Image: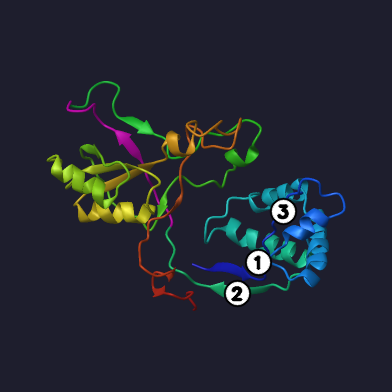
Amino acid sequence: MNLITITGLCILLLAVPAWPGQNDGLARQSALLWWVPMRRGDQLRYERELNSSVSASSLAAYHELFTSVPHHAGSSGDREMVVLLKAAFEKLGITVEQQNIWPYLAEPVDAAVEIVAASGKQPANGYPVSLSLQEQPVGGDSATNHPDLPIGWSAYSGSGDVTEEVIYANRGTVDDFDLLEAKGIDPKGKVVVVRTGGIFRGLKVKNAQRAGAAAVLMYPDPADVGYGKGQPYPQGGWANGSSIERGTVMWIDRPGDPRTPGREARQ
């Protein structure tokens, strides 16, 4: 699959807070102890110019630009985002080099998650219960109802069809699976449910695989990223009740394409 990336100069903008009593800049200048005295004045002027070039509205505009279309790797939105980013960087006076690479990417074909019976019981009326794999649209935010939004999925996860008992494995760490073993709970052949966070999601899958699990379901704990931290979106910035964490579960020990670890995938 053809994936287009751009490389250019990365700029980190740091807003330097005003110092109490900073009327003529002497307080700030005297605080620049890591600069030699003859350079502190120039550094102070540089910081003022840098801060004056950044505003909340300009940062918001770039944020809106970068999130204007769904753009998971290899999608048409990904190609469109390359064009938008290239133009934005060039507008800033940055020289941009565009490269084509051909990585080994994953795409969801079909997926479903259902509860087919209550715990310890046979299927009955009301079952199966289908669980949504798509976030619920948020009123006033058209991006949450974009027609190109994919279902929630984890890149490089295995394909299969599993109907089995469900067990809970906390964060999916090695210690968590050791605790299950100590309590006489065998995850072999089971569907393991784990919370996101703590360790990389790919390691959760790796640990479950080593324990013999047939499938892994991951969910974001509201205590970590939702109402346990603050107001969920759209009232605040934390995950709401239908938020899905997306990402890869590939756990090769080096970055890069799975077929060419450590470097980009050239044709």
Residue 110 on the magenta span: yes
Amino acid type, residue under disc 1 in the picture: Cys
Q: Where on the picture, by quarter, is residue 28?
A: bottom right
Q: Which residues are magenta?
A: 107-121
Q: Residue at x 73, y 50 (%)?
A: 17
The residue that disc 2 covers is: 99
Amino acid type, residue under disc 2 in the picture: Gln
Q: Alpha-carbon neighbours of circle 2 within 10 Å: few (<14), some, or many (≥20)? A: few
Circle nearer the viewer, 3 or 1: 3
Q: Alpha-carbon neighbours of circle 1 within 10 Å: few (<14), some, or many (≥20)? A: few
Contact? badges 3 and 2 (CB < 8 Å): no
Q: Position of residue 45 (x, y in %)?
A: 83, 62
The residue that disc 3 covers is: 15
Q: CA distance from mark 2 to mark 1?
A: 16 Å
Out of 21 and 96, give the one closest to the viewer: 21
Question: In terms of secondary structure, where does tag 2 sit?
Answer: strand
Question: In terms of secondary structure, where does tag 3 sit?
Answer: loop
Q: CA distance from mark 3 to mark 2?
A: 32 Å
Q: CA distance from mark 3 to mark 1?
A: 16 Å
| Furthest-right residue in this view | 24
Q: Position of residue 220 (x, y in %)?
A: 42, 40
Q: Position of residue 138 (x, y in %)?
A: 59, 33
Is tag 3's residue or tag 2's residue first in the polypeptide sequence?
3
Task: Judge whether residue 186 can be spotted in this image.
Answer: no
The residue that disc 1 covers is: 10
